[in-house]
Amino acid sequence: MTQEEQDLAREASKLFSGRVDFLLSAPQLKFLPDGDFPEIAFCGRSNVGKSSLLNALTGRRAIARTSVTPGRTQELNFFEVGEPTQFRLVDMPGYGFAKAPVKVVEKWRALVRTFLKGRAVLKRTLVLVDSRHGLKDVDREMMKMLDETAVGYRLVLTKADKIKASELEAVAQAVSEEMRRHPAAHPQLHLTSSEKGLGLDELRAAVLADVRS
């Protein structure tokens, strides 16, 4: 990393290790907080490790709820970072394979879609992809929607410690190649492990850079 990148990583680490407080859950758009601060949204398939990544990034054990039952996050959950608040993290409902009635799943999708299209303070969306499986059709649907609505996003591979290095390299290459065909995708692919801490410093720095862009 360059000196500038190292400085940004240190600043980001300090921010994430400081105040991170749950603000509110929004089951409908009318419950969204005022757009007073920049926001970074986290989305991904159910059971992709989204809550674990949020917990690892903030150094907390349970700021975001983890569950063995996919699809438990049914609302937009907002967290404030910094003292005073610098930005917000948004934990979005998981998509795909949610163990919920079809009508409920459609309600989540509508909430997410409308939020992404109309949230002026949303600086970047992080699309989480399980390293063990690579891109699935539901991930591609999300990427296409983000492309169409011109919402910039980063692809983040999770659970990178769960597969062999050679397999991880192959998945990363395949995802990178596909990512280049999407106009709203950031060119940098992030490889992370919530358990081992892999890639977390770089991702924190990327989030802070996006917040300030």
Image (cartoon, rainbow, N blue to C red):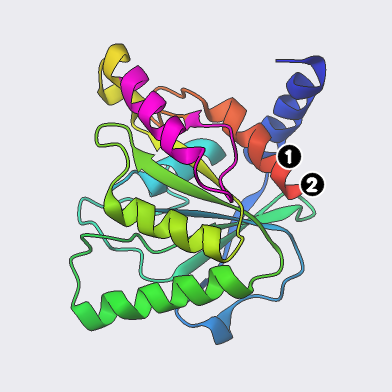
- In the image, is 27 to the left or to the right of 134? right
Q: Residue at x 60, y 59 (%)?
A: 151
Q: Residue at x 52, y 77 (%)?
A: 114
What is the three-letter code of the residue carrying label 2?
Arg
Q: Residue at x 27, y 79 (%)?
A: 104
- Examine the rendering and report whether any part of residue 165 can be seen: yes
Residue located beneath label 2 in the image: 212
Locate residue 10, reporting x and y percent.
73, 25
In the image, the segment drawn in magenta is: 168-190
Q: Is residue 176 magenta?
A: yes
Q: Is residue 161 magenta?
A: no
Locate residue 212, reporting x and y percent.
79, 46
Q: Nearer the viewer, residue 140 or 40?
A: 140
Q: Dot 2 lies on which element?
A: loop
Q: Around disc 1, counting alpha carbons within 10 Å, would you say few (fewer than 14), some (14 to 19), or many (20 or more)?
A: some
Quarter location, residue 132: top left
